[in-house]
Image (tube, grey):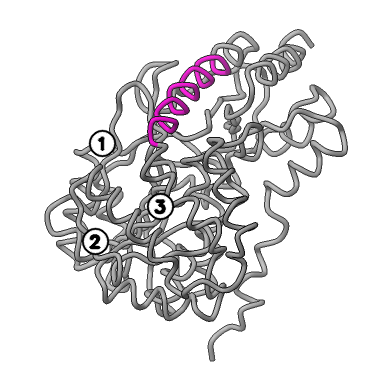
Amino acid sequence: MDEPLVTRLRDFGETIFAEMTRLATETDAINLGQGFPDTDGPASLLHDAAQHILGGVNQYPPGPGRPELRAAVAAARAESHGLDYDPATEVYVTVGATAGIAAAVLGLVEPGDEVIVFEPMYDSYPAVIAMAGGVRRPVTLRPTGQAGAARFTFDPQELRAAVGPRTRMILVNSPHNPTGTVFSPEELAVIAEVCREHDLLALTDEVYEHLTFDGVAHVPLATLPGMRERTVAVSSVGKTFSVTGWKTGWVMGPAPLVRVVSTVNQFLTFTANGALQLAVAEALRSEMAWVAAQRDALQAKRDRLSEGLRAAGFEVMRPQGTYFVMADIRPLGFTDGIELARTLPRAAGVAAVPAQVFYDRAEEGRHLVRFAFCKRDEVLDEAVTRLSRLSKG
């Protein structure tokens, strides 16, 4: 007899993001834990949303999403990556990327199926795999390269060894949260080869697709040979346009797989805010220059925070994308990220997230914490000033 859902989720309590945000609020600490910007997206996007709301777009939109947004998503994907999706059958709008990922896993993974995930992993992945009755098989990303320029990557042999007779799917997050790695074409080729060889599905979380640095390009896994027909790709507006609270995302893929996602999602969230969808559709057509400028600003913020963290005594990995930088706490004499993260708000007035909560093998990340740099420069500077107390103490 299958375990009840509450039993499958017994290991999932309050998320680390909620705990760190609560501690930051209680101590009036600077919150560099949760990845949300402290500035808004483009003015035209906000204005369009307000106009649509005031204009009466306040009732249920079509279940698959507004056709205007689905068409805009398909057009953007074709222009950026040469991937042609039929907006009527191969693009589906969800309440943020998290809902799209959840619906995909719940629809495509049967009880006992195995899902390969790269750890450290975003915390919704293990939870939704558990909800589906699946079994996760972690493949660890480890830092390689010289200090200050190290990036996280995986051992191809570990990936191949993780595949078993019940493996159903590989869940790929690139640009990767929390490490900031953008998988290279060579790394993606290994993943694609494993998928083709073992007839596996791929679920790709690409919410940071436009936020890559130093000229590093994001390459969707679906562009590789034989992968479009087996890949469900998920993205959203939140990170692209700095409106994380809008929770408007989309799923792209072959019609049979998207149909499974839509079948599940109609009984979860059903549909997403129609006024916001219309505003996002217009922004995808007209505000990509704003996105490019935002990417450049975030690269500068990455460098600003990284330099400050090094000056405060941390060893810092160099992220190629996302909102986050990973820092090694051992040079400061600390060894346990959870202990330090729970101490930081009161000891230094800064909140961070311990990386070990993103691992099945917690020891792999016990010495790492994640800081978000998607904040105003003066906020980052004040956080660095406060963190310098650790080394002086």
Q: Position of residue 45 (x, y in %)?
A: 53, 43
- Compared across the picture, whether 156 is left or right of 298 comes to left
Extreme-left residue of the structure? 225
The structure residue drawn at horizontal position 48% and vertical position 64%, both measured from the top left corner, is 94
Crowding near pointer 1: few (<14 within 10 Å), some, many (20+)?
Answer: some
In the image, is residue 298 above or below residue 124?
Answer: above
Q: Secondary structure at mark 3?
A: strand
Crowding near pointer 2: few (<14 within 10 Å), some, many (20+)?
Answer: many
Q: Secondary structure at mark 2?
A: loop
The one nearer the camera, 45 or 305, is: 45
Magenta-drawn stretch contains 340? no
Extreme-front residue of the structure? 55
Tell me the kind of residue under disc 2. Tyr
Q: Earlier in the sequence, mark 3 or mark 1?
A: 1
Q: Which residue is mark 1?
A: 184
The structure residue drawn at horizontal position 37% and vertical position 59%, both measured from the top left corner, is 116
Q: Position of residue 129 (x, y in %)?
A: 49, 67
